[in-house]
Image: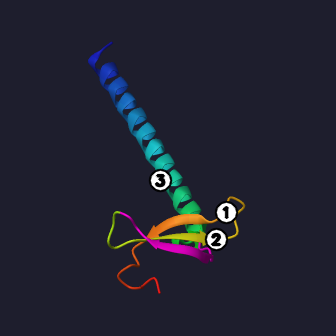
Amino acid sequence: LSAAEAAKKNKESYEEAQRRKKEKKAKSAAASKAGQQTSATNQPEFTKVDIRVGKIVKVWNHEDANRLFCEEIDIGEESGPRQIASGLREHYTLK
C-alpha cells in the first residue's frame, strides 16, 4: 500500500469506529429512556406497603430486653397468630 492508500484506509477505519461508537451510545440512551419510562409507570413506593390489621391475643414482657414486648397477633392466617416483638414497652403498660 502506498502512503496515500494507508492514510485513506486509516481514515475510513476511524470513521467506521466513530459510527459504531455513536450507534452504541444511541442504543444505550434509548435503553435508558425505556427504563425511565418503565419506572415512571410503576406504582409509587408508598403504595407497595403491605398493611394488615389484626387482633392482639396475648402480650408479655420480653425475657432478655427491657424495652420490648412480645405479642401474639391474629391477622386471620391459617397458620395461626404471629409472634412479634415490638418496642412499645416504654409507651404502654400490661394493664
Which residue extends farthest right?
78
The residue type indicated by label 1 comes to: Gly
Asked which secondary structure carries label 1, the reply is loop
Scheme by which the image is coloured: rainbow
Q: Mark 3 points at which residue?
A: 29
Which of the two marks, 1 or 3, is nearer to us in this view?
Answer: 1
Q: Does the CB distance between marks 1 and 3 fall below 8 Å? A: no
Q: Where on the picture, by quarter, is residue 90?
A: bottom left
> Would you say residue 11 sits in the magenta stretch?
no
The residue type indicated by label 3 comes to: Ala
| Residue 27 at x, y percent in the picture | 50, 47
Between the residue at mark 2 and the residue at mark 3, the CA separation in whole angstroms equals: 50 Å
Between the residue at mark 1 and the residue at mark 2, the CA separation in whole angstroms equals: 7 Å
Q: Tag 2 or tag 1, which sits nearer the N-term?
A: 2
Frontmost residue, 23 versus 37? 37
Frontmost residue, 57 versus 42? 57
**In-image side of 91 versus 45 (left or right):** left
**In-image side of 9 versus 72 (left or right):** left
The residue type indicated by label 2 comes to: Asp
Q: Name the residue under label 2.
A: 74
| Residue 26 at x, y percent in the picture | 48, 49
Frontmost residue, 66 versus 74? 66
What residue range appears in magenta? Answer: 50-63
Question: Can you tell which mark lies on residue 80?
Answer: 1
| Residue 48 at x, y percent in the picture | 57, 69
